[in-house]
Image: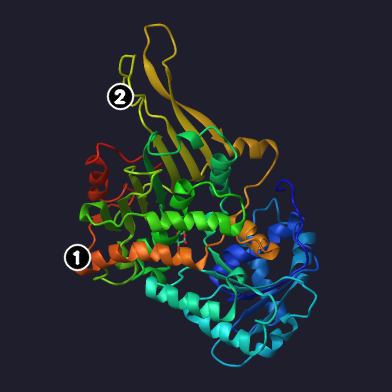
Amino acid sequence: MVARVVPVEPFDLVVFGATGDLARRKLIPALYHRLHDGQMPPDARIRGAASSEHSTENYRNIVLEALNEFVGPDALDKDCVDRFLTMIDYHRVDAMSESGWASLLPYKDDGSGRPRVFYLSVAPRFFEPVVTRMSEVGLTEGEPRIVVEKPLGRDLASAHKLNQFLGSKFEERQIYRIDHYLGKETVQNLMALRFANNLFEPLWNAGHVDHVQITVAESVGVEGRGAYYDGIGAMRDMVQNHMLQLLCLIAMEPPANFEPNAVRDEKLKVLRALAPITDADDMVRGQYAAGKGNPSYQEEVDNPTSHTETFVALKTHVSNWRWADVPFYLRTGKRLRARVSEISVTFKAVPHSIFPTAKNGKAGHNVLAIRLQPDEGIRLTMTIKDPGPGGMRLAPAELDMTFADRLQAAKLRMPDAYERLVMDVVRGDQTLFMRGDEVEAAWAWVDPIIAAWEERAEYPPTYDPGSAGPEDALMLMHRDGRRWREIG
Ligand code: BG6
């Protein structure tokens, strides 16, 4: 059970692309968990829609398989599964023709005020055709909510065009742009840590912070997603969205309240204050080589001349009063040593040390490390006296605020990001969704970096699988007399 479940009102949900990977891996399990935990009412209606021909019975089997594969045994109970399946039906619709669209007429506005959600779990090239068909059959009338997910464009121009198109059919309040990192429990906890405690905020500025690191490391490669990934790369896949959103939450000013636009206004200001990266040494990329029994990236995507980066390391600044001259180091990559997502804030050393230097020279810097995955939690490195007799020696020690202990004690399960986000759409709460101007501001910062790489037309340097990325990334830090935190 997840703590304190507040049920949502009955709703209608149409999932376009209902047989795809995202629907099977994430959406269906998320909806099931919400029913199981008592948050989703049994009279919600879920309709799967996709271009392939399936009977409802057939589709329910697909759903059942997805549940068996992606829902843990603790939550799988037959009674709940049966109830879940009866809430779901399936209709074939073809985004490129009129075929099947009449079957969605029951999902038109009936004046009851029941939330109607249309989830576009489809490739971006289908956004326009699906929304156009929706509008032709009247589904865009009333107050429907539409959910889209990245890639939201591949540069500023295409993102702007997409925003304009969506804006021609919907009001901004109806558009839910998912960045699933914002649905992660620890990411929300970061906001609680900053804005519900008075401990850190007075220190959260250039006067006290030495630097910030954001790492999203993955141990897997592109895993069969080569067709999507090649030509996209880590910058568009991870930095433009997830990494910059994390940076925003670290760097933003406290909003006046926790209302969607108040939060998003502050994030937007951060994106607009990001200093352009001009020094080539501050924008490192890499591509994984073959090794440890795995093919190289180029072999994996079957493109021996691919220039696509699977690793990025950047150094940037937020040009405002709070963060003047504080470096923000970002790093993300595939096939690295371990799967770790972590944000760390390293505070400045004490201005004057009255103690002998610590054995490893590390003592003196407090580091607040916010771990998104695995082992979600927050750890604060303090400097303490090395225990025992024998003089006043100092050593770093970690204060562990791992949530797993609390969750375990209360027998709670860490909900997946999509569980939270889908229920937020039903509730009409856009706080954890990106506004169109945020997406564009992120592209505006990312575009020149990609353009600089493209202009040089060089292959990204390769790095060994299981490493911490290319040598250049280590140098990026060493030049500043700093080092990356361990991936592991
Ligand atoms: C997705 C990217 O948005 O995020 C993937 O497209 C990446 O390439 C994934 O693997 C990482 O998400 P998570 O939640 O596993 O850290």
Q: Is residue 288 visible?
A: no
Q: Is residue 318 visible?
A: yes
**In this orientation, which residue lies closer to the viewer: 40 or 172?**
172
How far is mark 2 from mark 1, CA to CA? 39 Å
Q: Earlier in the sequence, mark 2 or mark 1?
A: 2
Residue 291, percent from left and from top? 29, 54
Please tell me whether residue 412 is drawn above or below residue 126 in the rendered image.
above
Label 2 with label 1: CB-CB less than 8 Å:
no
Residue 357, percent from left and from top? 30, 18
Q: What numbered label is drawn on residue 437?
A: none
Q: In the image, what residue type sits under mark 1?
A: Glu
> How packed is label 1: few (under 14 Cα within 10 Å), some, or many (20 or more)?
few
Q: Which residue is mark 1?
A: 458
The secondary structure type at the circle numbered 2 is loop
**In this orientation, which residue lies closer to the viewer: 108 or 358?**
108
The C terminus, quarter of image:
top left
Q: Which residue is mark 2?
A: 361
Residue 408, percent from left and from top? 65, 38
The residue positioned 45% from the left and 45% from the top of the image is: 342
Please tell me whether residue 448 is drawn above or below residue 320 in the rendered image.
below
Q: In the image, what residue type sits under mark 2?
A: Gly
Residue 153, percent from left and from top? 43, 73
Residue 410 as seen in the image, left or right of residue 448: right
Q: Quadrant of residue 10?
A: bottom right
Residue 449 as seen in the image, left or right of residue 387: left
Q: How is the protein colored in the picture?
A: rainbow
Residue 452 as seen in the image, left or right of residue 383: left
